[in-house]
Image: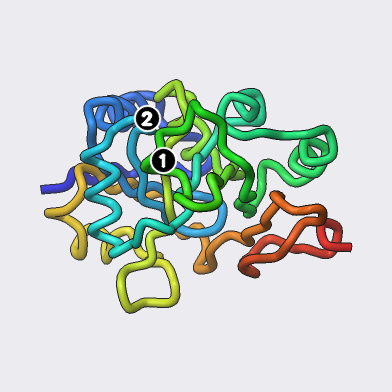
Amino acid sequence: MAQFFQIHPDNPQGRLISQAADIVTSGGVIVYPTDSAYAIGCRLGEKLAVERIRALRQLDKNHNFTLMCRDLSELATYAKVDNQMFRLLKNHTPGSYTFIMPATAEVPRRLIHPKRKTIGIRVPDNPIALELIEAVGEPLMSCSLIMPGDTQPLTDPYDIRDTLEHQVELVIDGGFCGMEATTVIDLTGDEPELIRQGCGATDEILG
């Protein structure tokens, strides 16, 4: 049975953030709010938790998982980044974007696109998500909470609890945080390429 934490969206309670981080670090799968929609995530190195998320979402091996980061300080650990990429990311983070980038050897192989060797990088503009990542001490492995057969993410924490109460360890109710997934930008080519238009504007990125 999933635990259900109601955390203030602007002033997250430290005690609940700490408890949520403990659930993540002990191998749990959690649902938490971001600046675009609710996401499902786990600890970066938890193989079993990753496989549970893959099965729950019915994701194939080519799915690009996302590393949800506190800021850009850990970027070079997980992604190969040049100066132009870094400037673009600095100008658009935190925000509702997922950037596809070449992965480094620090990223577990099961999280990397098997052919392209890429990983998604994201810095959410959401206090709960940012404080949770800070408390865990490393990026969260995440993806949007879009259930098989659906085109939009689940948005109501109570519906999420009813749907997933036996499949995750924790649902964080952070209030309404949006109904649209992130904008996905591929930075592996010569120019940024739009993969999915979401709630992040692309005028400045794509020119």
Q: What residue is drawn where x is 36% and y is 56%?
A: 61
Residue 199 seen in this snapshot: yes
Say which quarter of the image contains residue 82. Answer: top right
Location of mark 2 (residue): 17
Which percent across, then down, holds residue 76? 64, 26
Side (left or right) of 160 relative to 36 = left
Circle 1: element type = strand
> Looking at this view, is 66 or 22 the one in front?
66
Side (left or right) of 105 relative to 200 = left
> Looking at this view, is 199 or 206 the one in front?
206
- Mark 1 is surrounded, within 10 Å at the Cα level, by few (under 14), some (14 to 19) or many (20 or more) other residues, namely many
Q: Which amino acid does label 1 sit on?
A: Met
Quadrant holding the C terminus: bottom right
Compared with residue 120, is residue 87 higher up or lower down, i.e. above or below?
Answer: above
Compared with residue 191, is residue 83 higher up or lower down, i.e. above or below?
Answer: above
Compared with residue 15, is residue 152 higher up or lower down, i.e. above or below?
Answer: below
Q: What residue is drawn where x is 56% and y is 38%?
A: 103
Side (left or right) of 143 relative to 23 = right
Q: Distance between the residues labelled 1 and 2?
A: 17 Å
Q: Which of marks 1 and 2 is nearer the N terminus?
A: 2
Q: What residue type is labelled 2?
A: Ile
Which percent across, then down, holds residue 92? 75, 46
Location of mark 1 (residue): 141
Q: Which mark is residue 13?
A: none
Which percent across, then down, holds residue 164? 20, 58
Say which quarter of the image contains residue 121. Answer: top right
